Image (cartoon, helix red, strand yellow):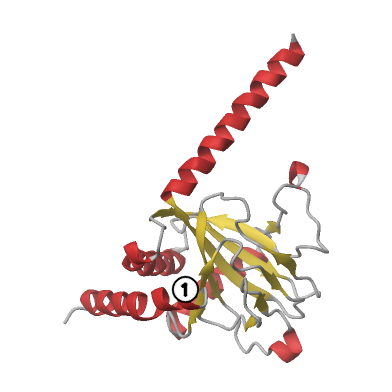
Amino acid sequence: MPLGPIMRLDLEKIALDYIVPCLHDIGFCYLDHFLGEVVGDCVLERVKQMHYNGELQDGQLAGQSNGISKRHLRGDQIKWIGGTEEGCEAINFLLSLIDRLVMYCGSRLGKYYVKERSKAMVACYPGNGTGYVRHVDNPNGDGRCITCIYYLNKDWDSKLHGGILRIFPEGRSYVADIEPIFDRLLFFWSDRRNPHEVQPSYATRYAMTVWYFDAEERAEAKKKFRNLTDAGKTEGALHED
């Protein structure tokens, strides 16, 4: 049997038998050994190349005027990529597999209808004790419904290196500590159900994140943004007069 149908069947089974039930029951889940050593290495090498070439910029905090970086709150360096850039074939393959997993979840994601996602955010914590304080990805209805993170850190020892992603599931009496180990793929709801933090990292820590959008919430968020933008233009014109 050709590789394509085998992978399609496996991905569909993973989506329906594992990802969907876990998201509904506990709000998050992860898959280990997702790409395998060879393809995972290709993704890692390309991310390292971006880092060593100085292509990553300080991550910004949402809502900060003029995109101000606050390194004590968020210490990562990032780059947004589409996956079609030169040399990003392995990354594009990774993104296509994640897309298929989310597509197979389909109508079983409750109220959500997903038909688009963000670009991929490549992130590096440089290992100087920086992290990312507790936050919610989508606290205000910007359309993001699923956060998906792929980790790229070989021989990671959280006791030595820190860097754990700690999730504080809403209404639960426990926290969930996710180690950022190589070839691990994590899913969780992006809204207030999953506040989370990246604990201080003491070794170089790589990850890649994509967000999937609920169509209706995303359209409403874009409409609100347009209205605010138009109002700002009108106010500016009035001041000029």
> Which residue corresponds to the image point at 55% horizontal and 82% vertical from the top-left?
182
Residue flagged by tag 1: what amino acid is it? Leu
Mark 1: give few (<14), some (14-19) or many (20+) Cα within 10 Å.
some
Q: Is residue 82 visible?
A: yes
57 in relation to 230, above or below: below
43 in relation to 81, above or below: below
Report which residue position mark 1 lands on. 23
- In the image: residue 144, left or right of residue 130: left
- Relative to the observer, which residue lies in front, 48 or 125? 125
User: Residue furthest toward the top?
Assistant: 241
**Looking at the picture, how far across and down is residue 61, in whole percent?**
72, 54
**Looking at the picture, how far across and down is residue 237, in whole percent?**
69, 15
The quadrant the N terminus occupies is bottom left
- Relative to the observer, which residue lies in front, 63 or 124? 63
**Looking at the picture, how far across and down is residue 82, in whole percent?**
48, 55
- In the image: residue 195, left or right of residue 71: left
> Which residue corresponds to the image point at 50% horizontal and 80% vertical from the top-left?
30
**Looking at the picture, how far across and down is residue 64, in whole percent?**
76, 47
- In the image: residue 90, left or right of residue 61: left
> Which residue corresponds to the image point at 43% horizontal and 56% vertical from the top-left?
84
User: Residue furthest toward the left?
Assistant: 1
- In the image: residue 25, left or right of residue 155: left
Q: Secondary structure at mark 1?
A: helix
